Image (spheres, grey):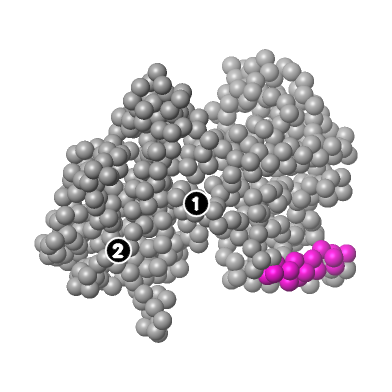
């Protein structure tokens, strides 16, 4: 959001020494409010203590008091839901005894309640309780600013209407355990598919259609329906009797949606206070046998390669089948399999000729924590690239739980890794090429094949990527060092364990490129307004490539990421 007042308020928030989740909490207080501009002005007022001339002195105290008020309001969303048995039965009957999102129902053999269906409130009545007390005046003021006074009054009326059955049922719906946990923690929310204002009333409708949305980090495991398929979008709510069993209120769904990002950040902060799971004694003990088993394939690599190709092919197919059953398949061409391995398989686009040699170069010349190559097996038109698995979770997930010092330390570790990669000598005769001297493969390149070269010089490479004379800049006439480059450094390919860099994966695009390519590609694949990754990436390089980035941005307009 580009409003000057909004940007000023966010700058004030980030000027106070808070944790990343706390900065996010207050940022979402502004950005997710009904009127962000008015909320931004309120933040500035609270920060200044009512006097902008005293803002520098009072900003820390004012922001921390606002944060405390906002935390209490968001925390009220996690209050216990007191629902009478009769209302639970009415909601259960309306929703057919099934989860409104997953459409699962309790299985007949479940005697312990593992699959039971829960009845939840969309907005707990505790959110507005006691707001008229003078002791809670700042809470009421904060909530009124976030929702606007008109919406707050409507919310109070909706929650007061719980004295009658039809009023109560508008604030109820049924969810299974996984969906209920995600909903209460702000990991998921519903948005209406129809273009209707927030003050519209859907109580007389027999059917309403919603889009399921998630906050970051997304829920894990992914919600699945009664057929075991992931749920990504549509949710349909219906009732046989709108007069006696009204649908859940679209207005209350909208209130919940506005709180979701803050709810999620509050949960993230709670998890940070508990510490990284990898540091627990239980995790360390369980990791010992896994580590022993995972070392076996790499230790026996040379012995395994002595087996006939046909036997190895059958073994990999069996491992792929077992891996699918045990771990699922997030990506069609990359499969986690037993014994601490990953297998990348498929035609050339998914298993590039240069990835295996790239892993060999990294193992031979650096101490970078990267997958170790077992083998690349070609079988007619299918290729199996078998490699070891690194511990950790993608930075895309872990970054939300990392403190500012941990992020700074990560940038230093990435800088060290990049320097080591740059020290790898080019064994090929061409300047810009893949690890084996062949064409480079990169999603940044033109055309559907995404492969080009090899190129004898940077000048030849620039001629290829400059799609029109009007896109050429003076930067393209500069000469750069050519280094070994990962070329796909993004938050999915950086693994984190216990808040520290665990390794870098996916060397499918790796090769020898101009020195700026690592940085500009890291920016190229960054989506969304969050700048946390870009801050880490910038700190990972001693050099500045801002001019090269400007030149690349002009070219990106005609070469979309995928």
In the image, residue 330 above or below residue 411: below
Q: Earlier in the sequence, mark 1 or mark 2?
A: 2
Is residue 361 among what the camera can see? Answer: no
Is residue 83 among what the camera can see? Answer: yes
In the image, residue 46 above or below residue 24: above
Viewer-nearest residue: 133 or 94: 133
Position of 15 with respect to 317 (left or right) is left
Q: Position of residue 384 (x, y in %)?
A: 73, 60
Disc number for residue 37: none
Residue 294 forms part of the magenta stretch: yes
> Is there a contact, CB below 8 Å, between mark 1 and mark 2?
no
Q: For residue 204, which quarter of the picture? A: bottom left
Q: Position of residue 115 (x, y in %)?
A: 40, 75
For the residue labelled by badge 1, is the local secondary structure a helix, a strand or a loop?
Answer: helix
Pointer 1 residue:
268
Residue at 48% across / 39% down in the picture? 23
Pointer 2 residue:
81
Q: How packed is label 1: few (under 14 Cα within 10 Å), some, or many (20 or more)?
A: many
Position of 166 with respect to 498 (left or right) is left
Q: Position of residue 375 (x, y in %)?
A: 80, 59
In the image, residue 247 above or below residue 472: below
Quadrant (top left/top right/bottom left/bottom right) for the C terminus: top right
Q: Which residues are magenta?
A: 285-302
């Amino acid at each position: 959001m580009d409003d000057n007042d909004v940007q000023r308020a966010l700058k004030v928030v980030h000027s106070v020494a808070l944790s990343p989740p706390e900065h996010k909490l207050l940022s979402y207080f502004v950005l997710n409010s009904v009127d962000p501009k008015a909320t931004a002005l309120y933040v500035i007022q609270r920060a200044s203590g009512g006097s902008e001339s005293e803002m520098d002195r009072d900003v820390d105290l004012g922001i921390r008091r606002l944060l405390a008020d906002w935390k209490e309001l968001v925390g009220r969303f996690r209050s216990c839901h007191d629902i009478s048995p009769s209302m639970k039965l009415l909601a259960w009957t309306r929703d057919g005894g099934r989860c409104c999102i997953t459409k699962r129902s309790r299985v007949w053999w479940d005697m312990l309640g593992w699959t039971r269906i829960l009845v939840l409130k969309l907005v707990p009545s505790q959110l507005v309780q006691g707001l008229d007390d003078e002791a809670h005046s700042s809470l009421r003021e904060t909530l009124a600013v976030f929702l606007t006074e008109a919406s707050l009054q409507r919310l109070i009326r909706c929650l007061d209407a719980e004295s009658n059955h039809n009023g109560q049922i508008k604030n109820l719906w049924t969810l299974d355990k996984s969906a209920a946990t995600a909903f209460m923690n702000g990991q998921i929310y519903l948005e209406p598919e129809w273009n209707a204002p927030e003050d519209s009333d859907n109580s007389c409708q027999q059917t309403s259609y919603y889009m399921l949305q998630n906050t970051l980090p997304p829920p894990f495991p992914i919600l699945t329906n009664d057929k075991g398929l992931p749920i990504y979008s549509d949710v349909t709510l219906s009732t046989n009797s709108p007069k006696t069993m009204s649908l859940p209120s679209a207005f209350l769904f909208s209130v919940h949606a506005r709180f979701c990002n803050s709810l999620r950040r509050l949960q993230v902060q709670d998890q940070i206070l508990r510490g990284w799971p990898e540091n627990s004694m239980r995790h360390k003990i369980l990791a010992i046998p896994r580590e022993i088993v995972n070392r076996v394939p790499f230790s026996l690599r040379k012995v395994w390669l002595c087996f006939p190709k046909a036997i190895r092919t059958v073994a990999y197919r069996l491992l792929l089948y077992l891996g699918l059953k045990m771990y699922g398949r997030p990506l069609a061409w990359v499969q986690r399999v037993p014994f601490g391995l990953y297998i990348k398989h498929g035609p050339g686009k998914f298993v590039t000729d240069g990835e295996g040699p790239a892993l060999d170069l990294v193992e031979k010349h650096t101490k970078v924590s990267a997958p170790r190559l077992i083998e690349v097996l070609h079988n007619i038109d299918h290729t199996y690239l078998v490699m070891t698995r690194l511990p950790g979770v993608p930075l895309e997930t872990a970054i939300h739980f990392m403190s500012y010092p941990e992020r700074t330390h990560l940038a230093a570790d990435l800088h060290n890794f990049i320097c080591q990669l740059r020290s790898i000598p080019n064994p090929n005769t061409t300047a810009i090429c893949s690890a084996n001297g062949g064409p480079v493969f990169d999603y940044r390149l033109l055309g559907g094949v995404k492969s080009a070269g090899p190129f004898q010089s940077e000048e030849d490479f620039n001629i290829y990527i400059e799609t029109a004379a009007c896109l050429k800049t003076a930067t393209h006439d500069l000469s750069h060092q050519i280094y070994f480059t990962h070329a796909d450094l993004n938050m999915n390919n950086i693994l984190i364990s216990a808040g520290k860099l665990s390794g870098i994966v996916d060397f499918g695009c790796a090769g020898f490129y101009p020195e700026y390519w690592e940085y500009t590609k890291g920016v190229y694949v960054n989506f969304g307004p969050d700048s946390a990754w870009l801050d880490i990436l910038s700190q990972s390089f001693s050099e500045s490539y801002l001019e090269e980035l400007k030149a690349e941005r002009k070219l990106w307009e005609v070469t979309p990421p995928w």
